[in-house]
């Protein structure tokens, strides 16, 4: 790997997400050698992936080079690599570019889509956890309408214009709202020779309400917003299979659809070597103590989605969102410095800043610490918060300009099929 030897302790961070970056920044001016490993050379702002999928933003506006994040910091190294195995007893990592030893290891690998063991769904459904996956979904959505223009078969055309989103959390709700706005304001202009009024957006939720991690008020209002946009909301409905053509459910309800987007859950992206059953908590996450220390391994830590820190307030661990990862990364940076200075570490305490979700133009729901509100003001708050947490001045400006342009023109300029997604459309023919 060509990482120089150093008299300073080597701290290796696996993953350049919110937790990994926050930790690296906290250690940037300390007497330690920091090595950041990631299979991508960029950080992804995942809360806005749905806008890439629906043509609202280009992918480079929500991605930021990892090397640029900590540019100019001494004793910092980045390597483009995927870690394949951790060997704790030797303090060695096996990666796609070779071995690397460490003094302290921080696992910040985040999460991946959870299909709950359903291999058929995993094979045929579309996920939306990365920029390549979002670009695939964008291409597929646009290709479906192009294909709908070419077919004379009514049932095939209906399936091509029928979108099924599984999962009523923020990702599913925001994607459904964005697709509904595309149907309303963009498709009639782009496809005047296609009856786009027949396009359907179905949002399926396994539980009793949408946004079940938020207040009932936010849940109720989000559903109301979606229904006004023309989204069909199906609650208490569990999807059991999808063969690429037909969506089946436990209630015998079926949907003929060319596109199923799976947003029904995530699980920790574990690495071989620490995925023993005694280490894994619910959601395939690694058990950590109040210092983000992996149980049984004093020199290994985990932060963010991959870490499950159980407590009375959070018996299943903290929410798998950006804020816990950012706060844990910063706090662990302080604790590692204290540890190296021979001082006792301090327990982590999560400060819940609230949660929010947008449902489309001028529509959002916000649950803050002591106040809940919905509508236009919530939408402006949602935009401000997301702009603030984007990394890089250029990205903030590009996203802001895009949002202003899209709002004024009611348009989405990035509806481009740059990288075609190959789907076998012949299966929809009788």
Image (cartoon, rainbow, N blue to C red):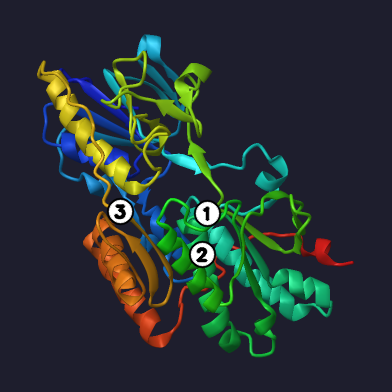
Q: Secondary structure at mark 1?
A: loop
For marks 2 and 3, give the CA distance.
21 Å
Quarter-of-image position of residue 63: bottom left
- The image's mark for residue 128 is 1
For marks 1 and 2, give the CA distance.
10 Å
User: Which residue was labeled with disc 3?
Assistant: 354
Q: Can you tell which of label 1 and label 2 is closer to the viewer?
A: 2
Percent x, y of residue 318: 36, 38
Residue occupying the point 28% across, 26% down: 290
For marks 3 and 1, give the CA distance.
23 Å
Residue occupying the point 59% across, 56% down: 205
Mark 1 vs 2, N-terminal side: 1
User: Which residue was labeled with disc 2?
Assistant: 175
- The image's mark for residue 40 is none
Residue occupying the point 56% across, 41% down: 114
Residue 186: in sight, yes or no? no
Crowd around label 1: few <14 · some 14–19 · many ≥20 (10 Å): many
Q: Can you tell which of label 2 and label 3 is closer to the viewer?
A: 3
Where does the C terminus fall, quadrant-wise?
A: bottom right
Q: Are marks 1 and 2 in contact (CB under 8 Å)?
A: yes
Is 399 or 364 nearer to us in this picture? 364
Is 4 or 219 nearer to us in this picture? 219
Q: Are marks 2 and 3 in contact (CB under 8 Å)?
A: no
Mark 2 vs 3, N-terminal side: 2
Residue occupying the point 76% across, 75% down: 157
């Amino acid at each position: 790997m060509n990482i120089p030897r150093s008299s300073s302790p080597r701290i290796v961070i696996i993953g350049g997400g919110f937790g990994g970056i926050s930790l690296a920044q906290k250690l940037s001016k300390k007497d330690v050698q920091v090595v950041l490993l990631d299979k991508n050379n960029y950080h992804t702002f995942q809360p806005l992936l749905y806008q890439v999928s629906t043509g609202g933003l280009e992918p480079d506006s929500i991605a930021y080079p990892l090397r640029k994040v900590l540019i100019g910091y001494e004793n910092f190294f980045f390597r483009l690599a995927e870690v394949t195995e951790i060997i704790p007893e030797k303090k060695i990592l096996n990666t796609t570019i070779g071995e690397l030893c460490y003094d302290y290891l921080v696992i910040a690998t985040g999460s991946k889509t959870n299909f709950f063991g359903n291999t058929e769904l995993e094979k045929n459904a579309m996920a939306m956890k990365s920029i390549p996956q979002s670009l695939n979904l964008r291409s597929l959505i646009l290709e479906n309408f192009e294909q709908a223009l070419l077919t004379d078969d009514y049932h095939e055309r209906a399936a091509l214009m029928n979108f099924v989103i599984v999962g009523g959390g923020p990702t599913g709700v925001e994607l459904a709202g964005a697709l509904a706005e595309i149907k309303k304001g963009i498709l009639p202009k782009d496809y005047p020779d296609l009856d786009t009024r027949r396009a359907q957006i179905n949002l399926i939720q396994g539980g009793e309400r949408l946004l079940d991690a938020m207040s009932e008020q936010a849940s109720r209002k989000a559903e109301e917003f979606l229904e006004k946009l023309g989204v069909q909301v199906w609650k208490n409905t569990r999807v059991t299979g999808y063969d690429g053509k037909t969506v089946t459910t436990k209630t015998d309800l079926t949907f003929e659809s060319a596109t199923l987007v799976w947003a029904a859950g995530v699980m920790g992206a574990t690495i071989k070597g620490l995925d023993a059953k005694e280490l894994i908590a619910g959601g395939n996450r690694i058990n950590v103590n109040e210092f983000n220390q992996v149980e049984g391994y004093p020199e290994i830590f985990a932060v963010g989605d991959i870490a499950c820190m159980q407590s009375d307030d959070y018996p299943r661990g903290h929410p798998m969102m950006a804020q816990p990862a950012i706060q844990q990364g910063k706090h662990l940076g302080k604790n590692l410095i204290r540890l190296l200075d021979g001082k006792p570490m301090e327990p982590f305490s999560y400060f819940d800043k609230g949660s929010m979700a947008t449902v489309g133009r001028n529509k959002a729901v916000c649950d803050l610490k002591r106040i809940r509100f919905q509508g236009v003001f919530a939408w402006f708050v949602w935009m401000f918060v997301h702009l603030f947490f984007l990394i890089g001045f250029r990205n903030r400006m590009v996203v802001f300009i895009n949002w202003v342009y899209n709002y004024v023109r009611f348009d989405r300029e990035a509806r481009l099929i740059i990288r075609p997604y190959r789907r076998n459309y012949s299966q929809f023919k009788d």
